[in-house]
Image (cartoon, rainbow, N blue to C red):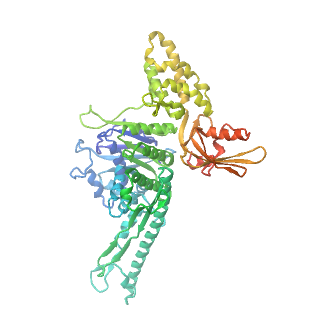
Amino acid sequence: MRLHELHINNFKFFPKQDPNSPLLKIDGKNLLVYGENGSGKSTIYWSIYTLLESAFKINEFDVQKYFDRTRSECLINIFSKSNQLSFIKMILKDDYGNSTEYYLDGNLHSIVANMRNSDIRESCMACDFINYKVLAKLHFTKYEADIDLFEWFQDEIFPYLRIPDIDPIISIGDYYKNLAKGPPQVKAFDEIDKWIYPNPSMENHPNEGVRKDFKKYNQFQKKVKNWNNQFLKYIKHLEVNANEILKSNFGHNFDLKLSFKKFDLKVKEKWDGLIISKPQIFLSISRYNNLKDRVLKPEYFLNEAKWTAIGLSIKFAILNDFLSRPAQAQLQALIIDDLLVSLDMNNRDIVLNYLLDHFANDYQIIMLTHDRALYEFAKRKIDIKGKSNEWIYLEMFEDLLSKTPKPYFKPLKSSLQTATDYFNQHDYPACGIYLRKRFEELLKNLLPPKYRKVPSKEDPNVQVDRNLNDLINALKPYCIEENIDYTDLAELKTYKDAILNPLAHNDLDAPFYRREIKILIEILEKLEKIKRGQVIHHPNRNMNFTLNKPDGTFFTVRMKIKESVVLIDEDGKPLRISVFSKCKVSSKSNNGDTDNNEENFDTLKDVYEEMCNRFGIAPVQDISRCFDYDGVTFDQKLIDLRI
């Protein structure tokens, strides 16, 4: 199931539910929200969190306080009237239209019902909430004498983690809390009305009842041992996966190590108390640039970007492990609030690629940010990957015309929709302006740097985007190189003046201008169906190929790519790779004779056709299946990425 409607009524910044709110029309799509500070953006995050987390509370009053106007923790909208109800409601639907409702208000019966609702509980465990505070907590741990991540795990990981070999139902966090209470107390043998903890001294007691109580102690210690052993196994598994993400996605050449000090619990000498040794999870760097155990103080050696990469790699490794989450959970969502704001542009790019390539198929993503540049960057990423139809984009502001503060959602239309509206209203210059904007967006997304960039006039060493006229002129040679059908796009060059200078037309031009604009709208609709950008293979990875020569011998080329290999998605044609990725050939084997002279090529097509020409082998047009991708075929790569 996926979230289709989110009702927020008199909760935090949101006043009475607006029946026209776009949050009632999510319709199972992913959500990207820009909200300026003070717009109520984070209320979306906290409303979902508060509702789902209510299922984990042990005491119903720990939830009711958020809806009690007399409490300092109250989250009711401060401008709402005392007789107005505050509530949160989520409506989920599956592919067949079946729906279910999660609901929370201050009514104790409603809260208790949620605490007993296994569906809400499992959905909470299957979701994840990540904001800047998650990474801030990790950064804070590095200032301790030893970098102990246990409390970070306990706060950010344990509530959503389930290890079947410990308990197939409850989270590892709840299981640990129960263990920390110690074994169930029993009546003392020689003192009336005294309760004690079962302990080792009972094993050989002459009284049979006392010896039976020892079994409770023994069973408890077995649970502690199993928790330690299974969690240690999980930590080592997590370490491997987190290091793979650090290396493959963040491009860091170091390994983190997670060491586990086991949980221990002993009964005090008088058996009326417990001595608890809390578990600890120590982080260290076991290898840095192929040097082992040289980084003795990671807290001083690693910069903020590397610490952030470590935290995200651990979180992402856990999200990738579906076995640790309820398999039948109704909702599986990833809610992110201003996570990427502290990252530089390179790390933003890495994290966005990872979210979109690895999680968008399995999680419903709700991404919130107050950073306009990040919002536009994410929109462009989604568009490049051809996933725009799976997302809703929202922009939030404070409604300055309202008597009391409340959110204002900007009505959003695509540039093409806006252009079509103006066309139907016969406002052709305005239509031309929006067509120009969308053509520029699409061409910048589609064209690789070779056709998109030119040296800056101010500084020849700096590359800048071409103007729209030059982008249009570059489209044809680009399409020829990529084997994209240019036929339906050819008239763009003929009628480009209608969008390059849309205000230069007067009423006398209108009949001719209308025809030109109509043709351009049709071209734009076709261009919208050509996507380039979904990453299938990351830089610095192997991408080899073998050519079979006419005489039966073979020629093998070993190489690494310098840039991401991306997909071309052209309407009506099978997926294929874009040829525009620089690469370095490290060796060539001619039927066993090896040449280790390195060669650099600007495109995959260049290296493939050059090697074919050297041995008189006829090249094929679609080279996607000519290569192996770190030993994986193209078709298997698509399956692995769930494409």
> Which residue occupies the extreme top position in the image?
508
On screen, residue 631 above or below 284: above
Answer yes or no: is residue 392 visible.
no
> Which residue occupies the extreme right position in the image?
551
Instruction: Give the camera-side residue of 153 and 102.
Output: 153
Instruction: Give the camera-side residue of 367 and 235.
Output: 235
Tell me which residue sits at (44%, 49%) in the image: 333
In this figure, what is the number of numbered marks? 0
Q: Position of residue 464 (x, y in %)?
A: 46, 31
* In this rendering, position of residue 329 left or right of residue 341: right
Answer yes or no: is residue 57 visible.
yes
| Image quadrant in which the C terminus is located | top right
Instruction: Give the camera-side residue of 10 and 534.
Output: 534
* In this rendering, position of residue 619 left or right of residue 5: right
> Which residue occupies the extreme bottom position in the image?
206
Q: Position of residue 374 (x, y in %)?
A: 40, 40
Tell me which residue sits at (41%, 57%) in the image: 160
Q: Position of residue 206 (x, y in %)?
A: 37, 90
> Which residue occupies the extreme front position in the image?
597
Tell me which residue sits at (26%, 33%) in the image: 402
On screen, residue 212 above or below 427: below
Q: Position of residue 324 (x, y in %)?
A: 47, 59
* In this rendering, position of residue 460 left or right of residue 556: left
> Residue 345, located in which quarter of the rendered image?
top left
Tell me which residue sits at (27%, 50%) in the image: 67
On screen, residue 182 above or below 639: below
